[in-house]
Every structure is written in structure tokens, then in C-alpha cells.
Amino acid sequence: MGFSFSGIREELDSKELGKLYRRLQADCRYLAPFADWKAIVAFLHEKKRAYRQKDRILWRLIQYYRQGGDCERLGTVFLAIFEPAILGLYSFWRSRCPYLGNDDLFQEICLTLLDVLKETPITSKKVAGKIDGTLKNRIQAMLDRHTDEAMIHSNIWPFSAPPSTDDSPESIKDEFFDVMKVMDILEVSDARGLLDLLARRRVIDWEQKRILDATLIAGKTLKDVSQPGEYERLKSRRRNALKAIRGYLLRILKKEVS
């Protein structure tokens, strides 16, 4: 059974969590002013006051959580505390990863948050911001892996392989070899027309379009088109462009099949 916020809110009122709260409240003076877990969650959701106190509460709760045992129940509390961050990530990525079902995406975000709380080194300053930032990075990396897996198991480029790290024109062209199979859907006749369309639709920006144009169509390497000190930046720009193109064409293809 997966997570749901209705179930999480009910669990906050459970007898087991109530007992745990009273035990931790007796041990931690920062919890003393609050009646129960719901009062803690409401306080931490406020945006304009007592930032230092919030840091102290969160930091101490994380330390308790990492002790394991009965404190494992604090996972439910943290899901309630970070509900805005979870919903924000879910809303952002829901339409951007069609290869992962909505419920699976939600569960992945919740599980990743709990992993972050267990594993990430956390100091007692700006605790929530650090957790949010690490969670966003982990989710991005997780969805990148799902994208590559979707590509590997598909028969149509650009979903047949992860991005190449080879800088040769032949390698870049291989990545685009089967894109002709989806050009009819997009009503473009050649690779340059495809890049123009993707730039107009803001899938990639115009600098990325120029990089791909030079290395894919003109047959140059990144070293040919890079100014001194720019190679790594352009390499990263090209990698991100290829990733964006694959994700976009996957969504187009999925709509066409359905």
C-alpha cells in the first residue's frame, strides 16, 4: 500500500504517534510549546516567523528519525511536514514524465524524501531548504534514469540509447539516425527543420540549436566550434539539449500511439 496525504493526516492522530510525541516532547524542549504533531506541522508550514526555531525542531526530529526503532514512525510526520515540497515536485513533473504513472511518481517522491532524511548530512541551519534542494536533485536524477531505461527498451530513436559521450560527428549522427521515423508526425523534412521547430517550441534554446546544427549537420566537433575555455560548457549544453529532445519526442510519440 502506498502513501496518501489523507492516510498520512489520519496517522498523525494515531495512538502510536501520540505516544511517541509525548516521549520526544519530554526529551526535547523545542517541542514543549506544541500540543501534538499537527500543531508542529502547522507551525513549520508558516512562512514568516521563527526560522531559527523551525531549524532546531526539524534538525532534532531528523536526529530522532535516524535512531530507528520506534522513531521510524516519524517518516509519516516528515511526509506531512514536506507536503508542499512533495506536491510542488509532483505537479511540476507529472506532465513531463509520461513513462512514469502519476501514482508511481508520487510514491517515488515520498520514498526519495525519506531516503534523503536518512542519509543526507544535515547541519542545524536552513534545514528545510537543504532538504528541499537535495530532494529536487534526487528526483531529477531518478527521472533521468527512468528516461534512459525507456529509451533503451524502445525500438525508435531517440529512445533507443542513452546520450553518447563521444564527440565525433558520426556518433552524434548515430543518435539521430531513426529520428526520420517521427519527422512525419512533426511535419518537418530534415534535421535542420527539426532543430528549428524544437527551438521555436522552446524544447531547446537557440544556442543549443546552433551547437547541434554545427555538430550534427555541419559535421564539426565541439572543439571546432568552442572558444578557449568553452568546451565543457558547450558539452553540457549539448547533453542537456539531447536529453530535452528525447523527452519531448517521447511525449509526442506516446500521444500519437494513444
Image (cartoon, rainbow, N blue to C red):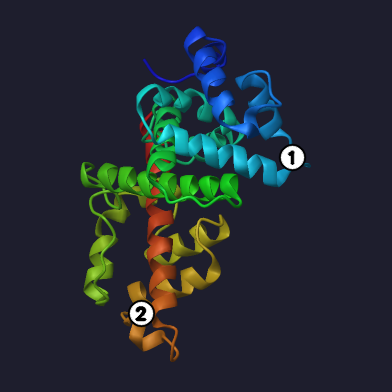
Total count of labels:
2
Mark toward the start of the polypeptide (2 vs 1):
1
In this view, 232 is above or below 49: below
Label 1 secondary element = loop
At x 61%, y 42%, the residue is 56
Say if residue 119 shows up in the picture.
Answer: yes
Q: Name the residue under label 1.
A: 47
Q: Nearer the viewer, residue 191 or 128?
A: 128
Q: In this view, does 234 lie to the left or right of 86?
A: left
Q: Is residue 207 left or right of residue 126?
A: left
Looking at the picture, how far across and down is residue 67, in whole percent? 38, 33
Q: Nearer the viewer, residue 74 or 244?
A: 74
In this view, 192 is above or below 54: below
| Other-residue count near label 1 (Cα within 10 Å), few / some / many at <14 / 14–19 / ≥20 | few
Kind of residue at disc 2? Ala
Label 2 secondary element = loop
Q: Mark 2 points at which residue?
A: 218
What is the residue that sits farthest to the bottom in this orientation?
228
- Quadrant placement of the N terminus: top left
Tell me the distance, in whole angstroms, between the alpha carbons under discs 2 and 1: 52 Å
| Other-residue count near label 2 (Cα within 10 Å), few / some / many at <14 / 14–19 / ≥20 | few
Looking at the picture, how far across and down is residue 165, in whole percent? 26, 68
Looking at the picture, how far across and down is residue 189, in whole percent? 40, 59
Looking at the picture, how far across and down is residue 240, in whole percent? 42, 62
At x 35%, y 32%, the residue is 257
Say if residue 89 shows up in the picture.
Answer: no
Kind of residue at disc 1? Lys
